Image (cartoon, rainbow, N blue to C red):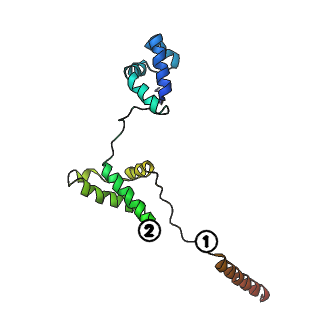
């Protein structure tokens, strides 16, 4: 049975590398219950791991992993558009963001590879998370000022009293 993949932070990796240098890679793998291949990789990337640990100890992966953004210009342009729409108190839906992203990509890409960028739902989720946006449910202005509220409450109470007094 396969074991689940594990995620190790930089401090753990550097601890394993240090132990491996003092003893052996196999001993470090047994001691820390990791695959010997991981120990060899971490020893090979020791300089990069040390450099990154000085910046951020919580990081688990080296830079450069994962898929690249479609376009930096696209990200900036769509973010600015969302901010401007929200500043005007206009609604911005997921569908609108995807349409705007496709439109911007068409201008940014100069017609090359236009079919490859679809602004999928997955892309949108990651875009919103990367840029700290959230799309909220559409709401109405529910809070009225006190004058309107008391007036409405008095009218409601009057109708309630009149129906109670005129029961058959």
- Count of marks, rendered view: 2
Residue 17 screen position, x and y as percent: 45, 18
The reply to whether callout 2 and callout 1 are in contact (CB within 8 Å) is no
Where's residue 123, x and y in %?
37, 50
| Quadrant location of the C terminus in the rendered image | bottom right
**Dot 1 alpha-carbon crowd within 10 angstroms: few under 14, some 14 to 19, many 20 or more:** few
Which of these two is toward me, 88 or 39?
88
Q: Can residue 55 be spotted in the picture?
A: yes
x, y percent for residue 38: 42, 22
| Residue 118, placed above or below residue 148 | above
Is residue 168 visible in the rendered structure shown here? no
Residue 155 location, quadrant: bottom right
Return the residue at label 1.
143
Q: Residue 104 placed where, x, y %?
A: 29, 58
Residue 66 sits above or below residue 119 on the image? above
Label placed on residue 73: none
Query: Secondary structure beneath disc 2?
Result: loop
Q: Residue furthest top?
A: 23
**Foreground residue among 92 and 80:** 80
Residue at 61% across / 71% down in the picture? 143
The residue at the point 38 percent across, 26 percent down is 48
Q: Which residue is mark 2?
A: 88
Q: Residue at x 43, y 19 (%)?
A: 39
Q: Is residue 74 left or right of residue 13?
A: left
**Residue 78 in the figure: left or right of residue 6:** left
Spatial CA span between label 2 and label 1? 20 Å
Q: Residues within 10 Å of mark 2 (few under 14, many from 20)?
A: few
Q: Secondary structure at mark 1?
A: loop
Q: Is residue 47 above or below residue 99?
A: above
Q: Earlier in the sequence, mark 2 or mark 1?
A: 2
């Amino acid at each position: 049975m396969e074991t689940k993949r594990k995620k190790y932070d930089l401090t753990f990796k550097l601890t394993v590398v240090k132990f491996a240098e003092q003893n052996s890679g196999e001993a470090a793998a047994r001691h820390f219950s990791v695959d010997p291949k991981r120990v060899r990789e971490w020893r090979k990337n020791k300089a990069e791991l040390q450099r990154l640990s000085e910046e951020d100890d919580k990081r688990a992966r080296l830079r450069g992993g994962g898929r690249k953004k479609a376009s930096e210009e696209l990200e900036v342009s769509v973010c600015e558009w969302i901010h401007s729409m929200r500043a005007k108190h206009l609604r911005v839906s997921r569908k609108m963001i995807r349409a705007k992203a496709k439109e911007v990509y068409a201008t940014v890409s100069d017609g090359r590879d236009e079919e490859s960028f679809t602004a999928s739902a997955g892309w949108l989720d990651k875009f919103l998370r990367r840029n700290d946006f959230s799309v909220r449910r559409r709401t109405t202005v529910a809070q009225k000022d006190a004058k309107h509220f008391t007036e409405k409450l008095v009218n409601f109470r009057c109708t309630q009293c009149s129906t109670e007094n005129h029961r058959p």
